[in-house]
Image (cartoon, helix red, strand yellow):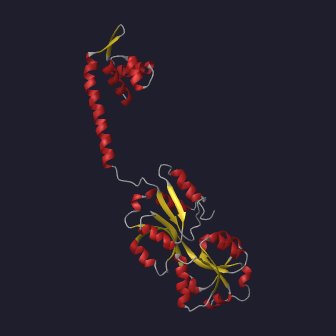
Amino acid sequence: MTLSQIHTFIVVSQTLNFTQAARELGVTQPAISTQIQLLEDEFQTKLFNRVGRRVYLSQTGLLFLEQARLILEQVSQSTDAMQRFKPASKVEPIQLGIGFGTGFGDDTPFLNYLRGTYKTQTIQTHQALDDELVQELDSHAADMVLTQIPEETPCYEDLIKRFDLNPIQKTNILVVAAPHMASGKWRRDPKILEEYPLILPSRHTFFRDYIESIFSNLSLKTNVTLETSDTELVRKVLLSGIGIGVLPAINIKKELDNGALTGLSVPALSSTSVLGVLTRKGEAAQIPSPLHLGVKILTSGWISLTP
């Protein structure tokens, strides 16, 4: 016995006409006959008596009609209850802000996978400086911010007090350059950074705040020749051998592995950075799908951080 059969039985009992019941249900008359026949076969009794072209409920049919109505009423009450007590979820588009050093853009596998998996919940992404993204979180213009946060950045403690930080992956912070840039004269003394053109992240990013705090503590007078929030541009400039940069190691893993770039030892800048998602306090549970999926696929190594 199915709910479709029960519904069909009730409509036929109201119309007492198989053809009219078929029109009301939007099916063929033979389909109506089949549904009723299946019920009668299950009960091993007739639910309708047929006299010529006229149809009447049998005594068994009258008894079953009451039960059929109760069944559909209980199903309706159960559906209403489940909808009423279903946990609230965010139905508006999820606004995902992307900060510095994530390796994610609008055409990277990670975001394409999110969009393909959660078709009923639109994910809108945009890239901005970290300071701007934090303001968007405060003003509810963004729901999530994905970015790199050095653990020794001056604002780290303030961030974890104001927001929930959901870490995805940790990486080392490296001073990096093309191999020939430091050949023969590199020293571990951070003062050596004053002797090279520096390629650094834009101001108003957590990564730049970290670098500037180190430079300030060491009283370094550096020569910054390029500032950009585009990690791909930083990577290309470093590969050209124009200067030295400071980056999350995971953004240049391929170049480090094949020797195109090399990590330079500067203990003062040896720290770790967290690739993580910032959400407003207590709101991560309202937008779990992209966050939990991101954690799963990134820690599995299935999708690369770089395009």
Whole-percent x, y for residue 202 in the image: 58, 76
Query: In which quadrant of the rendered image does the N terminus lie?
Result: top left
Is residue 103 left or right of 285 when viewed as pictured?
right
Q: Position of residue 256 (x, y in %)?
A: 67, 73
For the point 39% across and 73% down, the residue is 162
Q: Position of residue 251 (x, y in %)?
A: 61, 70
Q: Residue at x 49, y 74 (%)?
A: 131
Q: How many marks?
A: 0
Q: Is residue 94 left or right of residue 184?
A: left
* Viewport quadrant of the C terminus: bottom right
At a point 43% along the width and 54% down the height, the residue shown is 92
The answer to whether 110 is drawn above or below residue 252 in the figure is: above
In this rendered view, identify the residue nearer to me: 253 or 126. 126
Residue 204 is situated, as x and y percent measured from the top left of the image, at: 52, 77
Q: Is residue 73 above or below residue 59?
A: below
Image position of 159 with respect to 96: above or below: below
Image quarter for residue 243?
bottom right
